[in-house]
Structures are given as structure tokens and as C-alpha cells.
Image (cartoon, rainbow, N blue to C red):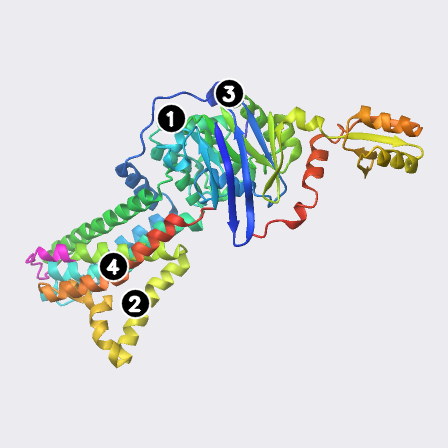
Amino acid sequence: MTTTTAPAAGAVAPRHHTPVRRPSLLRLTGVELRKLVDTRAGRWLLITIGLTTAAIVTLQLIYAGEADQTFLNFFVPSLLPVSVLLPVLGILSITSEWSQRTALTTYALVPRRERVVAAKLFAVMLTALASVLASLAVAAVGTLVASATGGAGTWEFDWSLVLNAAVLQVTSVLMGAAFGLLLLNPPLAIVGYLLLPTLWGVLGEMVKPLRGPSEWLDTSKTMEPLFSSDAVTGGQWGRIAVSLLVWMVLPLAAGLFRTLRREVS
Amino acid sequence: MITVENLTKRYGPHPAVDDVSFQCEPGTVTGFLGPNGAGKSTTMRMICGLTTPTAGRATVSGHPYQELPNPGREVGVLLDASAQHAGRTGREALTLSAYTMGLDRREVAAKLDLVGLNAVAAKRRVRAYSLGMRQRLGLAHALLGDPRVLILDEPANGLDPEGIFWMRGLLRDFADRGGTVLLSSHLLREVEAVADRLVVIGGGRIVAQGDKNELLAGGGTVVRARDSAALRRALEVANLSAADSSEGLLVQADAEAVGQAAADAGVALAELRPASGGGLEQLFLTLTAGESTKEAVR
């Protein structure tokens, strides 16, 4: 034990202070961003996301044909592993409050729980956007290295791809957060998030009558155009929207409802 | 100031808290007593807006908890010392809350110092804390926003005797300066030493509440006679209920009435005194007898 007996009486005097304002959403978002990095688990998850991007680019520098070593070809493939890891970040951000029981503190300080949830969603969305910037930066470094080592190193790039990437990563992290809100338990949410869409994908392949709907509802199919270097068509955006309604908006709404009503203990 | 009005919480058909009402005034320490599972924690969670009551309401400083703009600045809450992220350091746990409340960073160091967690302890992860250290961290957390009200659930749990003595002084001082303290415990001695008022709960219902001294005075009378069968008959004639205790018969009446009943029957007494020896413990056991056995299954 590292304790002393120093009553320091004056310090516990209840003060009468000026009326206090409630914490702004900006402040709460700052708190949630800090929570993403102030534990070892959170820090390593972010580092892993960064390292995966770097690893993909490095592998391409070694194994891809010299003509393929372009900015575009470094950038697009690095999005996929990140889009798999970001939902885990979203899930943990929401569920660790319950598994670590910090919800007791968090919701005692901010009893309007929807404000905490909003701050968490903002925080993980900002992280998703930052991951796109990281992918761009790593791709740029890869391109520079490629042009120095005899690769193509061309910078030709359609900037609408950045928009696609942002949509992909933000919706990925939000889908994770939605599952976290709905299931409120880390292992359950992670397994649920990984398993359900896959299961749906398999069923869509196996069961003929489901093949039509799965074109609209299987996120692994609807999101595919976001990885390609071709422009996403209006019809493809429509399918993305419909699949996100089912896998992101509905769980978010139901999860918010559940989180607001749940007993914190 | 804490006001609790007819709070009720049912889990299915089982009432965990049943029509509980009490008030905690500024300048007082209220001891919230009851056996485990009596509904203390559920009541406290309802006051803090963490559990939705089935019926009734509670206010802190005149407002429902959810309507306090920045609750941490008005009321310090410690409901479970173990409810901290195991992977954060003690200092980080406080820093997050200080930032949420909009407090100066210096408050964190000041409160860590106040509860006796030194720089080495503050840098360690909560995982490595003993229960006593977690309680101290929780207390620092509750005091962080310089609140006027404290709500503490079993804060003495895990503290060593020296720590308990220290905490008593801290809470007494807080109340003497105009603060309101609601403190739950099943450690009777702990509450008896620091509380001004008592609220005793058993099986979800309030079984006694009031000024500590008045409640203790109502502990009954201990009476003993060589011929205890005759004494028992005498008390029956006088319509006084008597229960066996290790020291003699415990009668729920004052000494005068018991003495008169014995004299009327011509029974010579060997001992007659207020049952103050057991103090609160006696009261507590009397009031919650039977309740503790049907602990809430949660």
C-alpha cells in the first residue's frame, strides 16, 4: 500500500461555484478519442491498423510487377485490411464501457447517454478518416520508393477514390459500432459482426431465391465497387445505401434504444 | 440535499426496492444500512439515473439527476470501486473525468494527493491496485469536481482500519462544511461512528430511519431475574413482548415499564438497563431479522 494519513482538511470543502455548463459534444468527442489510445489494447489496435497498411505496400514493393507499382495500386489494396480492423475499433469503443464497467462512471458524469454515444461515433468516424489519410501517406511513400527503385512510381489518381475510401472506412467503423451498441458485449459483437454478413453471403450463394436480395443486402458485394478504380455508378450507390440501411442504420437505431434504456451496474 | 420519494424497482414480480422515501440534508452524514441484497445499491443507482425506477422519483440538489447540467460538479458518486478500466492508470482514469467535467488538470494531482495515492501508485494501472487503493481512487474520483453532495456505496470495503479512520474524518469534515453525504454500508460499526442519521433497509423496504441517537435509544431494555419464568409471566401480564438474548430478556419498552411490571408481580430483578451495549448492531439485527435470509437474487 502506498498511503499516507494526511487529512488536508480544506481540500474537501464543498465549494459553491458559479453555475456550471454541460460538457460540449466537442469536449466529449475529445474524451472518447483519448479513450481510444489510453489503454494498451486500444493503442495496439491502432498501431496494428497502421502496420497492416505499411505491410501491404511493402509486400507490393517486393512482389508486384514494376509497372504495377503505382500510387493507385498502393492505395486501393491497403484499404481492405483496414476496413476489417476498423469495425473492431468501433465495437470495442462501445462495448468496453460495459465489459470494463466504466459505464458506471461515464454515464454518472454524462447522464444523457445519447451524447456519449454520439461522441463515440464521432470519435471512431474521425479515426476512420484518419486511416484514409494514413493509407494515402503510406501509398505516397511507397510510390516514392518505387520510383527510386525502378518501379513505375506514377501518381495518376482519380481523387473520387478518396471519397470512396472515406465512405468505405467510415461505414465500416459505424457498422462495428452499431453491432457494439446492439449487443453490448465485446466477443458477442465481434463474432456477430464477422459472422452474420458472412453467413448471409453464403446463404445468398446457396439458396437460389436469396440470390436476388443478396445483391442488395450483402455488404461484401455491394461495397465491392468502392475498391475498384472505376467510378461507382448510381445503381451501385443505391445498393450500398440499401445494404447499409440493414447492416448499419437499423442496428444503430436498435442499439441506441437499448443502450439508453439499459440498467448500468 | 438528496430527496428520495417512493422509489420502487421491480425485477419481474420481485421488488428489489419497495416504496423507499428519505431525505439527506446538507451538513449531515446519512448512513444507509442494510444486509447484502437489501436494495441499497439499487436505490443509489436510481438516485444517479443509472437505473430507471419502476415508480417514484429522486432529486439531487432539487433536480432529477439526468437534468443536472454537469453532475460531477454537483454530486460525487462512488458506486463500485472496481468499475474502472483495468488497463488505465489511476491518474488517467481521473484525467478522463476531469476533462469531461471541464476541470483544471491540477485537480487530478490534488485529489490523488488528498486520498493518499502517491506518484508511483498514480502511474500504475488499476489492474495492479488492491481493493483499498481502488476505494481511494474512487473517493478521489468522487471528490474531483468539488461537489456538494457525496453518494458512496460501501466505500469502507477493503480499506484497512487506518484507512477507515481516515475516511471517517474526511466525510465528517465534508459534512461539517455544509456537504451532504449518503453512505451505504453493511459494516454497522463504520456507520455508527460517522453518521448523524440512519436509514435502515431490509428486503427492499425501509425498516427504520431517523436521528442516530434516537434510533439507538429505541433499542429496548435488557432485564434479568433469578426466576426468569416468573419474570416472563410478569411481562406477559403487563403485555410487554420479550425476546431471549445472551444477556437476559430483551424487552421493547423502557426500563420504567419493565421495572413496574416486575414489581407488580413481585419478581426480584437481577439486572435492568437500556439495551445500549449492542448499540446499532442490536437494532440492525432486530430490524432486519429474517430479511437477510431472503437476499435478493440478482
Residue found 40% across the figure and 49% down from its top:
A261
Q: Marks 2 and 4, how far apart in space? A: 14 Å
Q: Marks 2 and 1, how far apart in space? A: 48 Å
Tell me the subunit letter for badge 1.
Answer: B
Q: Are both tags, 3 and 4, on one chain?
A: yes
Q: Tell me the SS state at disc 4.
A: helix
Q: Nearer the viewer, mark 2 or mark 1?
A: 2
Dots 2, 3 in contact, CB < 8 A: no
Tell me where residue B216 appears, x and y as whole percent. Answer: 69, 28
Dots 3, 1 in contact, CB < 8 A: no
Q: Which residue is mark 3?
A: A8
Q: Tell me the SS state at disc 2.
A: helix
Three-letter amino acid code at disc 2? Pro
Residue found 28% across the figure and 72% down from its top:
A201
Tell me the subunit letter for badge 3.
Answer: A
Tell which of B261 and A185 is nearer to you. Answer: B261
Q: Is residue A41 left or right of residue B27?
A: left
Tell which of A136 and B25 is nearer to you. Answer: B25
Dots 4, 1 in contact, CB < 8 A: no
Q: Marks 2 and 3, how far apart in space? A: 58 Å
Three-letter amino acid code at disc 1? Arg
Tell me where residue A109 appears, x and y as whole percent. Answer: 39, 37
Q: Which residues are magenta?
A: A149-164
Q: Earlier in the sequence, mark 2 or mark 3?
A: 3
Q: Are both tags, 2 and 3, on one chain?
A: yes
Q: Which residue is mark 1?
A: B106
Question: What is the count of numbered marks?
Answer: 4
Q: Tell me the SS state at disc 3.
A: loop
Q: Which residue is mark 2?
A: A197
Q: Residues within 10 Å of mark 4 (few under 14, many from 20)?
A: many
Q: Which residue is mark 4?
A: A83
